[in-house]
């Protein structure tokens, strides 16, 4: 009986060492050498060097002076510990009602008849750091008014932060909300709080 158990135990120990310890260390080390920024979490720092977020994980911005991200179904919104979509199917009446309400409010606020899909739909993770250029441009007038600057100036900052398709063919053009908001703060002074 021991002759049958001993090879099984040896194989468990061997493969645990190779696949559970050596391989993860090797892959992590290779990633740190080849892609140190991404392997470190693509952390974004302010001028003082303080970490303010990651270029890969969305954050909730609600102030009118900032680009707003797409809606999030992750926990109470942009909660990385509860990353997920809403799990509501496309024909679910609750989802349809929420999207219609959000779209109607956005149309009224922006004075437009069309709303980009990402403005009213959540991503699969609920933590998408990007929005479409169309949604970003739709917000330019609100940001300009809140900051007391010309819409063209805000549009220029947004346009400078449009990222193209990956390798020129994968995905869609996109705007990173955190990086663009940081650029808006760097370019335009925030108005003093009222009160």
Image (cartoon, helix red, strand yellow):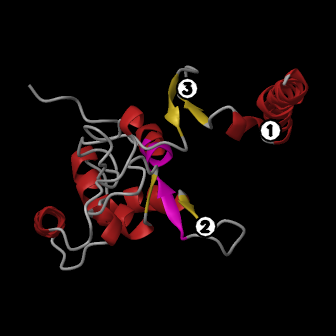
The residue tagged 2 is 164
19 sits left or right of 56 in the view: right
Real-space Cα distance between discs 2 and 1? 24 Å
Q: Which residues are magenta?
A: 172-181
**Neighbours of disc 2 within 10 Å: few (<14), some (14-19), many (20+):** some
The residue nearer to you, when weighing 154 against 167, is 167
Which mark identifies residue 47?
3
> Which of disc 1 and disc 2 is earlier in sequence?
1
Spot occupied by residue 100 in the image (x, y as percentages of width and height): 13, 69
Query: For the residue labelled by badge 3, is the local secondary structure a helix, a strand or a loop?
Result: loop
Spot occupied by residue 75 in the image (x, y as percentages of width and height): 29, 38
- Indicate which label's residue lies in the foreground, 1 or 3: 1
**Neighbours of disc 3 within 10 Å: few (<14), some (14-19), many (20+):** few
- Residue at horizontal 55%, vertical 42%? 55
Q: Is residue 90 above or below residue 9?
A: below
* Quadrant of the snapshot with the C terminus: top left
User: Which picture quadrant has residue 80?
Assistant: top left
The residue nearer to you, when weighing 147 against 89, is 89
Query: For the residue labelled by badge 1, is the local secondary structure a helix, a strand or a loop?
Result: helix
Which mark identifies residue 31?
1
């Amino acid at each position: 009986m021991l002759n049958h158990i001993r090879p099984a135990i040896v194989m468990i120990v061997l493969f645990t060492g190779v696949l559970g310890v050596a391989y993860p260390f090797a892959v992590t080390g290779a990633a740190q050498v080849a892609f140190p920024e991404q392997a470190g979490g693509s952390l974004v720092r302010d001028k003082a060097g303080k970490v303010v977020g990651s270029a890969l994980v969305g954050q909730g911005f609600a102030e009118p002076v900032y680009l707003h991200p797409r809606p999030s179904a992750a926990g109470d919104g942009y909660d990385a510990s509860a990353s997920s979509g809403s799990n509501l199917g496309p024909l679910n009446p609750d989802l349809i009602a929420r999207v219609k309400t959000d779209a109607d409010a956005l149309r009224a606020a922006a004075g437009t008849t069309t709303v980009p899909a990402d403005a009213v739909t959540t991503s699969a993770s609920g933590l998408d750091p990007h929005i479409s250029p169309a949604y970003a441009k739709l917000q330019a007038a609100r940001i300009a008014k809140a900051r007391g600057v010309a819409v063209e100036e805000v549009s220029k900052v947004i346009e400078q932060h449009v990222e193209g398709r990956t390798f020129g063919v994968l995905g869609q053009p996109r705007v990173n909300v955190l990086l663009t908001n940081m650029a808006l703060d760097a370019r335009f002074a925030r108005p003093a709080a009222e009160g």
